[in-house]
Image (cartoon, grey):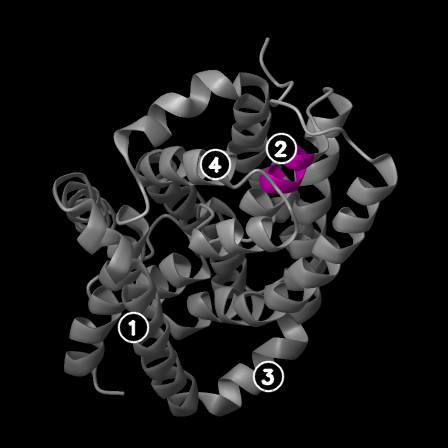
Amino acid sequence: MSTGLSLVLFPVALGIVMLGLGLTLTVADFRRVVAYPRAVIVSLVCQMLVLPAICLGLVLAADLRPELAVGMLLLAASPGGSTASLYSHLFKGNVALNVTLTAINSVLALFTLPLVVNLSVAAFMGSDSSLGLQFDKVIQVFALVLIPIVIGMAVRRRRPGFAARMQRPVKILSVVVLAVVITGAVLGVKDEFAATIGAVGLVALLFNLLSLGIGYAAPRLLRVGHRDSVASSFEIGVHNATLAITIALSPALLDNTDIAMPAAIYGILMFFTAAAFGLVAARRGSAAAEPTRPSATTV
């Protein structure tokens, strides 16, 4: 795929995904944090602090080469997305909590993601590396993520019926555009992709499984309800690989194929692992036979 074409298509793909997310959000989703304070706090601590630390440990233990190490940490810093809400819906999690966590995580990631990327680039590739997200690139990421979300939220507020009708077409379009872009990129470097699977595949799989497990276990240890814990698990365990791939491959940002590989591999694996985890969680929920009642996560 040519540089000029990817320069246009990668931001467009991410913009469509973020627009679709915005069509599902309202201001109330940000305010809803008061309804689930314990679940939100636990999930955010896991997302922002625990998972990057675990990812760093896996990267060091596997002795990944620098670009792949940066790619894994970029993935760890990426928030959850609409796919997390879909899995939560399928396996009886609290979807309202997912929407709230996605909204908050997407905003926080605008600040934490560049920090994690720049620290990992400096640590693994040297402070003199030309890679990284300097201020101008941070502004581009901010625009790519926040502006489409705000547009989507504005459309939903002014035209709720239209926004509801457009959610499914926009979601399908985002998948199609992303598939075309990523397929073109992978085909262009298919030899490198095949070689990278062996190097980083196990690390990506372990990170995914640990993210799902911690996302469920940590809230449960703090007496968060089963449905809220399932929502937290998918929010933490299903990272926005689209965002990580776009930042890594976009010529205006990192423009590095190797950095994109962990997110690309993770994006394939997590569909299967999340489904398997969801089945286990659903059986656990049925066995517990939790009565239908308002969430008990308020403090």
Q: CA distance from mark 2 to mark 3?
A: 39 Å
Residue 294 is left or right of residue 2, and the answer is right
Of the 4 image quadrants, the one containing the N terminus is: bottom left
Q: Residues within 10 Å of mark 4 (few under 14, many from 20)?
A: some
Q: CA distance from mark 4 to mark 2?
A: 9 Å
Residue 250 in percent (x, y) is at: 26, 67
Identify residue type, mark 3.
Answer: Ala
Residue 214 in percent (x, y) is at: 70, 39
Mark 3 or mark 4: whose residue is earlier in sequence: 4
Q: CA distance from mark 3 to mark 4?
A: 40 Å
Q: Residues within 10 Å of mark 2 (few under 14, many from 20)?
A: many
Is 228 magenta? The answer is yes
Identify residue type, mark 2.
Answer: Asp
Mark carried by residue 96: 4
Q: What segment is highlighted magenta in the picture?
A: 227-232
Mark 2 or mark 1: whose residue is earlier in sequence: 1
In the picture shown, does residue 292 fall above or below 181? Answer: above
Q: CA distance from mark 4 to mark 1?
A: 24 Å
Mark carried by residue 195: 3
Residue 169 is left or right of residue 121, and the answer is left
> Viewer-proximal residue, 240 or 54?
240
**Image quadrant of residue 6?**
bottom left
Q: Between label 3 and label 1, give the one nearer the viewer.
A: 1
Mark 2 or mark 3: whose residue is earlier in sequence: 3
> Viewer-proximal residue, 152 or 185?
152
Mark 4 and mark 1 residues within 8 Å of each other at the beta carbon: no
**Image quadrant of residue 59?**
bottom right
The residue that label 1 is drawn on is 173
The residue that label 2 is drawn on is 228
Q: What residue is drawn where x is 43% and y is 51%?
A: 81
